[in-house]
Image (cartoon, helix red, strand yellow):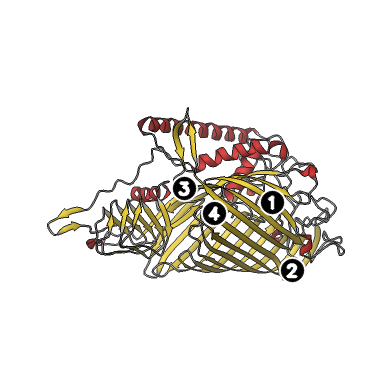
Amino acid sequence: MTARITSGEPSRRNAHLITRMNALMITRIITRIITRMMTSGSGARPASRHARAGVCARHHAMSVAALLAAAGALLAATPAGAQQPTWSTCTDTAGGRDCAPQHGMTRRERDEAQALYNAPSTRREHGPFTVPADSMVRGSLAVIGGPVRISGTVDGSLLVVNGDVTFDAGAVVSGSVAVLGGRVTGADTARIGRLRMDEDSVRYVIEDGVLHIDAPFEEIWRLLGQGKPTGGIGMRLALTRTYNRVEGLPIEFGPRLRYHTPLGTVAADVFGVFRTGSRLEWTGNNVGHSARVELRMGRSEHWSVGGRLFDVVAPVESWQLSDVETGLAAFIAHSDYRDYYDTHGGSSFIAFRDGRALRGSIEVSRETWGPRRTLNPFTLWRNDEPWRENPVFDRARYLRTQARLSYDTRTDPIRPRSGWWLQGEYEVGDGDHDTFGTERATPVPSPDRQVRYGRGMLDLRRYSRLSRTAQVNTRVMVGGLLHGDALPLQRRLSLSGPGANTGFGFRERVTTPDRLQCSAAELLPGLPALCDRMVLLSMDYRHDINWLVDLFGGARMIQTDRSGYGGWLLFTDVGRGWLHSPRAAQPATTADSPRGFEALQTSVGAGLELGQGGIYVAKALGAPPSRGVQVFVRLVRRY
């Protein structure tokens, strides 16, 4: 939920107090983490057969919900004392208003532009976007992509990222105008505040609704005689991957380079990866690398070509929960919702994007895969309990070709009211296996065993607005084996847990045969995902509500930034998995088990959303009463 102070000077003092308390709490947590990692042992405690494997466990679900909700609020909160951009207005001259743009932006001005986008009161849109002559946008406006045409009035500041802006005669922007990665025309015929412009396209990431602009720490050179920035170099130290049971906390560090040429923008990143593991040690198992070079071409950088070198830990399934949710569940609640494997190699790619609507890419990679053992990283909750064992995956060398395509017409990528979202992926793999991993009780040697497969994934979502406060959202997801040999374990699928079929606990066996993990009668170490095909249908009915939270004796301290930011919803999930090409002698899905859609597994539930995430309750239909309900917290919407 986004915070906004509304009660004058006393509220501002309270806000500063809250900020200081949060800083003190964060400092204590970090100190405790480092101390525990430095003193804890490096050996992993093997998980028992009956170890609980999910944050949704009934006996502690509400405690976990409270912890995750607090963490989500801490991450999403905007400091009350954050300053808005303080750019001055245009100057009055004898001939009118002088709004000549000042080219190039300092690092501070870029930070202010980023803060403007992330401010709770800012309206966020994606280009192309137009403000008609007879309309007014109340408050600040931020637009990603272009073109942007202003014919009416913006009662606030205007920010445009990677898009051109056109002001018609009589257009009004009461605040400042910042354009990052675009050009401005018609400014002299409009009434606007101070205009700052940087024509060089910027690279950015929007994660959970928060804009992060990648800007160099220092401008290190300029074109002789022009004074125009042409590139930048900086250092990066970031926590870009999820906290998990096989790495601990992975940290990326290293230089970044941006250089602008007549052909396009060259972007290069060379990062080392350090994994904290169970304790801080500099060993070969705790270090890796991730290097990338890319050339972005075209006026709006529609095309890009490049290559990567990597030695990282990759997740088997990343489509169910976001990275932030997965990392917090592991760090706070001792529950890791993913499995992981080592991948080492390189790739080359070509990509195309047309704003936010259409994107596509083709990537060819040569990789070496290997299993990753379970460690014992520190967690805030249940730190003395064993982790769910990470499954033993295939050891193999693969040549893979992946083609991806996405199409997006949603009104908002974070809180869509209407529109379509489509993402498809087709993958062809050709590999040589040294061993097959955990599909039976022990890995099976397979020297010189060649595997060729074709795999596809399709995610189709439709958002339909029924009224000003109600909407129906649907999602259809299908994927898995299309042709060839059985999929390697690194490319298998599952459907249980809060990110898929929500009424079923993560990696829990509810039915026999198992139609969600496709596991056999014998429980395998780590309960791996074994399905080579799956289908999932989800449907939500959502109704907006306005929130007002009273704190500190009834003082109005925090409220949502707009109507419809919270809501209640009813939902259902229907789906199942199949194993059509088993490698084991005893397949999970036996020949006499139902293979059609009559064996679909169904869940129903309800939720209360507060901002981007919420608290949800789900029940599996047909499951034994002893299974109870699943209670879980999400930091982003279901889909």
- Residue labelled with disc 1: 604
Give the vertical position of 116 relative to 294 (above or below). above
Viewer-proximal residue, 307 or 193? 193
Observer-side mark, 4 or 3, equals 4
C-alpha distance separating marks 3 and 1: 27 Å
Mark 2 crowdedness (10 Å alpha carbons): few <14, some 14-19, many ≥20: some
Mark 4 vs mark 3, CA separation in Å: 12 Å
Q: Secondary structure at mark 1?
A: strand
Depth check: give the residue in front, 100 or 292. Answer: 100
Q: Residue at x 50, y 42 (%)?
A: 547
What whole-number distance in Å separates the C-alpha atoms at marks 1 and 2? 39 Å
Image position, residue 152 (x, y; %)? 30, 60
The residue to which callout 2 is attached is 451
Kindly give the residue lying farthest to the top in the view shown. 553
Nearer the observer: mark 3 or 2; the answer is: 3
Circle 4: element type: strand
Rendered view: 168 above or below 142: below
Instruction: Report the residue marked by disc 4.
Output: 470
Q: Which residue is mark 3?
A: 563
**Residue 540 at x, y = what percent?**
61, 55
Q: Nearer the viewer, residue 55 or 574?
A: 574
Q: Nearer the viewer, mark 4 or mark 2?
A: 4
